[in-house]
Amino acid sequence: MEVRTRFAPSPTGFMHLGGVRTALYNYLFAKKMGGKFILRIEDTDQERYVEGATEVIYDTLRRCGMNWDEGPDVGGDYGPYIQSERKSFYLPYAKQLIASGHAYYCFCTEDELEKRRKAAQEKDEVFKYDKHCLHLSKEEIDRRLAEGQSYVIRMNCPVDGESTYHDLVYGDMTFPNETLDDMILIKADGMPTYNFANVIDDHLMGITHVMRGAEYLSSTPKYNLLYDAFGWQRPEYVHLPTVMRDAKHKLSKRDGDAYYSDFIDKGYLTEALINYLALIGWNPGDDREFFTMDELVDAFDVSRLNKAPGIFDVDKLTWFNAEYIRRMDFDRYLQLVTPWFDRVLGGKGIDYHRLAELMKDRTEIFSRVPDMVAFLAELPDYDLELYTHKKMKSNPEVAKNALALCLPVLEAIPEADWKETSIHDRIMEAISGAGLKNGAVLWPLRIALSGLASTPGGAMEIAYLLGKEETLRRIHIGQEKLSRA
Ligand code: GLU
């Protein structure tokens, strides 16, 4: 039998990282088994409809490399793949359940339900629909329907006994039937609820494995009752533990750590994010950590999914990201880093190619780049203390001499010859001519040029990047500061 999995997001406008991981496991499993990965848009909740939200889903999945075999825009034999376009499919199935006694019309109004909910609350009971309308006579139902009264269709759940199913991650799951409520299948607006539509669609689309968040574990018995009522085969279930920020907290919108786009905006790479997400809740059974999408497909195994909630550790992701950047082609790095350089260095005429060479191994996430290179645009106001460095044998006195030594040497370099090699050769020549230690000159020179204790590149590289005029200007500033000390 061909494996068919599906990712069934609701278009909310954003892709939650938990959702990306759910899509990923569905994709990996389908590909691993030589099966099909299907995308279905679950948009029956019209109140939550967000303009442009389906594009966010398509775009994210495509950027992540999870191409769907069937779905909206690519088509397939089981369409349409957008639930609102399937609206007319559901009511006949609900009527079939009414005929077989597995569902019933309910005319209770919101007000009535609210009263009963409150009464239950006062008695400290969990409110469950009380099957009030299950007992209406056929005549009464027909009369109310003929009058055009508003109704929903509810499922008629058993109240005794228990329901059991097997989950490939959580094992055997058993729930007492008295905990199941007579959920709504068709809403007053004629639309199916998620609870009903997911079953009908999964069946009609031939889904063999339903992989979704663990929050659906306790509703699954109700879905199984629907499969049984129709005489359909139940799918295999693979529930996935929640992705958490820490032991107690979920990833949240407020903390800016919930959505795929949050991380892309911060300058994380999609491939690093996917690699890391795959490992939250799954492990390859050995100590490999780096995977391309194809390698993930190859290594994926449902039996290695964890039951425990996965902790999303941003520091670990950052480490992955830095590794991906270190391993990346230089040209791609240059292309990706350029807009981040532009934020602070745009129009300054700085040699981005050289700067990128100095930055590549130091870049953990792109959003940190502007702060790291901003000193090239503007000399930070630094503390004289920086000139003191024990190991470099530098202090303000030493620094004064060092800058006095370098200034004429640099002044003498013609503008056209302002290259790293000539700067390097002449400074080194001056240092050895004066019989000084390298550090005692290069440390203060770098401080004067950058105002920072740590920089990409050393004094000569920075001098080159700044250009002659700015280099000399910064040395003058350093000399002035030192003379005031
Ligand atoms: N539309 C549901 C959601 O976004 C899908 C759950 C499922 O995979 O069945 O949570």
Image (tube, helix red, strand yellow):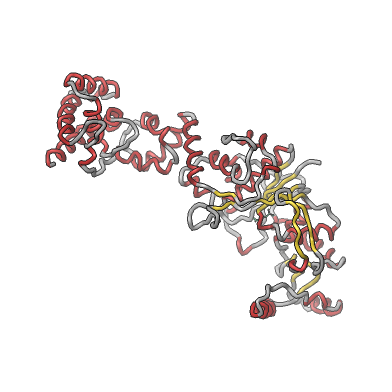
Q: Quadrant of residue 354?
A: top left
In the rendered structure, the answer to whether residue 114 lies left or right of residue 402 reads: right
Residue drawn at point x = 73 percent, y = 56 percent: 198
Instruction: Indicate the quadrant where residue 378 lies.
Output: top left
Q: Quadrant of residue 160?
A: bottom right
Which residue is at the front of the view, 148 or 326?
A: 326
Q: Residue at x 56, y 42 (%)?
A: 276
- Ligand 1 resides in the quarter of the picture at bottom right
The residue under the point 19% across, 27% down is 406
The quadrant in which the N terminus is found is top right
Q: Position of residue 399 (x, y in %)?
A: 18, 33
Q: Position of residue 217 (x, y in %)?
A: 70, 57
The image quadrant where one finds the C terminus is top left
Vertical placement of 107 versus 352: above or below? below
Which one is nearer the viewer's eye here, 6 or 139? 6
Above-or-below relation of 398 to 344: above
Q: 236 or 147, which lies in front?
A: 236
Q: Is residue 56 visible?
A: no
Q: Position of residue 257 (x, y in %)?
A: 50, 52
Q: Is residue 375 visible?
A: yes
Give left or right: position of 424 versus 318: left
How far across and how far down the image is residue 386, in percent? 24, 39
